[in-house]
Image (tube, rainbow, N blue to C red):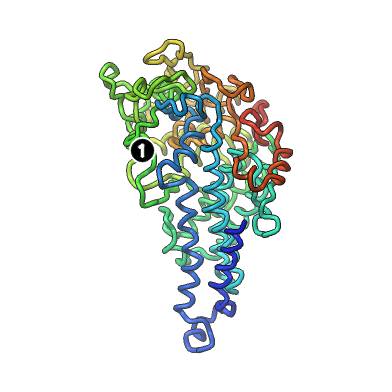
Amino acid sequence: MKKIFIKYSLAFLAVMSLSNCTDDFQDINTDPNGITEESLTQMNNNVGNEFQPMFLNVFNATPAWNYQLQQGLIGDVYSGYMTPPTPFAGNVNNMTYALVDGWNGFPWSDAYENVMPQTLNIKNAVELSGDANAIKFVHLANIIKVTAMHRVSDIYGPIRYTKFDDFATTGEYDSQEVAYQAFFDDLGAAIDGLEAYIGDVQFVPFDKSTLAGDIAKWRQFANSMRLRIAMRISKVNPALAKTQGELSLASNAGLLETEDMVVNTGFPHPITVISGSWGDIRMGAEMESILTGYNDGRIETYFNPSADASLAGDYKGIRMGIDIESKAQYLDHASIGSVIDGETITWMTASEVHFLKAEAALRGWAGAGSAQANYEAGVTASFTQHGASGVSDYLADNTSTPNDFVDALFPVNDIPYGSDVKIAYNPGGTNEEQLEQIITQKWIAMFPDGQEAWSEFRRTGYPRIFPVVVNNSGGTIDTNIQIRRINFVQNELNTNSANVQTAVGLLNGPDNGGTRLWWDTGGPNF
């Protein structure tokens, strides 16, 4: 709280002299008492520079160990995407459901040190400037804030959000239901408010994404994010989900259907270090089962063939939560491939948007189009994104199914895949069967964003994630139901205890990894 107060003060001092800002630039340039062009530029820099840490911490870009703790040892592993060969802490760790408090606070600290305060600083600076046109920066900051904070909420549940702009209440938590309504409000205001600034270029110097400061594209991204979070609540509040989803489908902002949202961080993707330099992450068992069973061409981009000579040319994964004695046992399994080459991190793909529309059509949302057409467009967009060939034959394949998983070393870890879900879309299947096809392909396409994939698994039950073999949770996490959330972080318990205790009361159960989030109903999908 003290840090936030200091930032309030700095922001106030930085913009005090700008309170008489006006839109009459001709008069400004000639009136010695008006704001100068130099001062206007400085104001934009003061606001614009706050975006830098936000862009680098929705997914933490550097150092790699921070990303590993923010996402790599939570969403990336619980999604079935990846598994460490390393038996951290004697194999008593997140993978075996012995949740490590020293690891699991990083999604929270990254957000509350590098996203929430910066958004507030931008809001305060803009308000103090008196420049009505600077509201566009607030809208843009709120889009990034929602992108970050829905991920944080989907890890812990209740978060500090709606009351964060008041120093007296900044430590108070919202229930996840309240937070999600605020996400919709912030995105809706941004989508509507930015329409007047299409063509404005003042965000260009500060935009680290491939949207390149294009306000029209930022509206598309915000609208696509609204569709994502609308779908997230489709089971717990289907009426609100439908309302918000149909707003997105009907909006003149459009959706990111032809372009991915990618951030240029200026740093190598942290997984290149975690997988390559450290050897601390490898292909997950579910990825092996599904991609090899489907003979999916994206496997060559997603993973490198196993280095073990006895597995030459094969892509071998590791099942999460097994008994691993030493790193050497599974180190030579498939590492992460060229999908993470370069200095970019993908926040959202066009393929995800198509899959969202496919499910929206399945749920009967107006404006969604055909479930099958959207499904096939999603697969095609993903193949295009990763330079994979043969998408037409792939979409026509109505026989291939995921393989059963066979551990390379210990048969005790073998497990059959839980269904025979196929690739070729079956419009005659039940809603549940069609949804499994949609989510399975969506899961493949979102790689390597394990956090979003884990959330979708918890919401729908798809794809079929294998249960752990070793469960060190002491009974707090059911092996078959699997982990549902991360408990509140220790630093909050130490410094914000009363508010944390109130937040625990907003959960559907005790503060542990076995308690379902608000939108994770555990009920049927339809």
Residue at left offset 64%, top offset 48%: 495
Quadrant of the drawing holding the C terminus: top right
Report the number of numbered marks: 1
Residue under label 1, please give it: 339
Q: Residues within 10 Å of mark 1 (few under 14, many from 20)?
A: many
Residue at left offset 45%, top offset 57%: 52
Q: Left or right: where does residue 282 sit relative to residue 312?
A: right
The spot of residue 509 in percent (x, y) is 71, 31
The spot of residue 261 in percent (x, y) is 45, 48
Circle 1 SS class: helix
- Dot 1 amino acid type: Val
The foreground one among 54 and 91 is 91
Rendered position, 191 above or below 306: below
The spot of residue 354 in percent (x, y) is 50, 39
Rendered position, 29 above or below 418: below
Q: Is residue 419 visible?
A: no
Rendered position, 220 above or below 13: above
Q: Left or right: where does residue 83 sit relative to residue 277?
A: right
Q: Is residue 114 visible?
A: yes
The foreground one among 353 and 146 is 146
Rendered position, 506 above or below 148: above
Q: In the figure, residue 307 lies in which quadrant? A: top left
The foreground one among 450 and 403 is 450
Quadrant of the drawing holding the N terminus: bottom right
The spot of residue 271 in percent (x, y) is 38, 38
The foreground one among 438 and 98 is 98
Q: In the figure, residue 487 lies in which quadrant? A: top right
